[in-house]
Image (tube, rainbow, N blue to C red):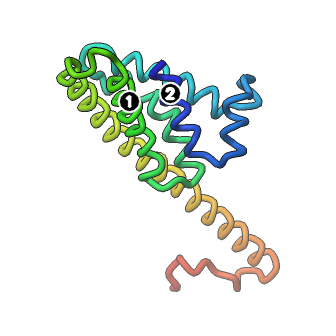
Amino acid sequence: MIDERWRDAIFRTYPLDTVGFMRRQKDQFANPVGQRTTAAISALVDLLIGEGLDSEAVRPHIDEIVRVRAVQDFSASQAVGVIFLLKTVVRELVRQSEEGASLYGELLQFESKIDSLALLSFENYCICRDQINQLRIDEVKRQHSRLLERAKMIYGDQAEDPDTPKH
């Protein structure tokens, strides 16, 4: 139940037409983002409910959620903010439960795990954005190199690389 509510909260961060598609489309090839996000959420909830929080065990699942959002040009707060949606989901479930007041200590411990998860998510987001930026830089370098090669073919050795020192 927690994972379904968290998934729905994450899906609501997308445009309305996308939300409907992500919820309805069950084919993993037609809806890879929805399917991978759902699987990652389920795994993360299982890991959060267990004792402690193994950062190495949660990293691949965080990556499934955050990497897509980094590629889709979500801001850092939008990409990582979905982790905090879990707090809202859990608080709502505790509030609705009959023994809600007695669960306060456990709720605080669980929220501490969510905070740790958010920090790991932010770190992951930064790594993803760095990779994307490096890919963009590499592409500009390739384009520059191709243009320089063309210029040398057309103008001969007169077209020099502006980055190389002149003798």
Residue visible at 50% across and 81% down in the picture: 165
Q: Secondary structure at mark 2?
A: helix
Specify whether 113 is left or right of 4. left
- Residue 72 location in percent, x, y? 60, 50
- Residue 87 location in percent, x, y? 35, 34
- Residue 56 location in percent, x, y? 34, 25
Residue annotated with mark 2: 5
For the residue pair 131 and 58, the one nearer the viewer reads as 58
Instruction: Check the image and report above or below for 30 versus 52.
Output: below
Specify whether 56 is left or right of 153. left
Mark 1 is surrounded, within 10 Å at the Cα level, by few (under 14), some (14 to 19) or many (20 or more) other residues, namely: few
Q: Which mark's residue is nearer the viewer, 1 or 2?
A: 1
Q: Earlier in the sequence, mark 1 or mark 2?
A: 2
- Residue 156 location in percent, x, y? 76, 80
Residue visible at 52% across and 85% down in the picture: 166
Residue annotated with mark 1: 92
Residue visible at 74% across and 76% down in the picture: 152
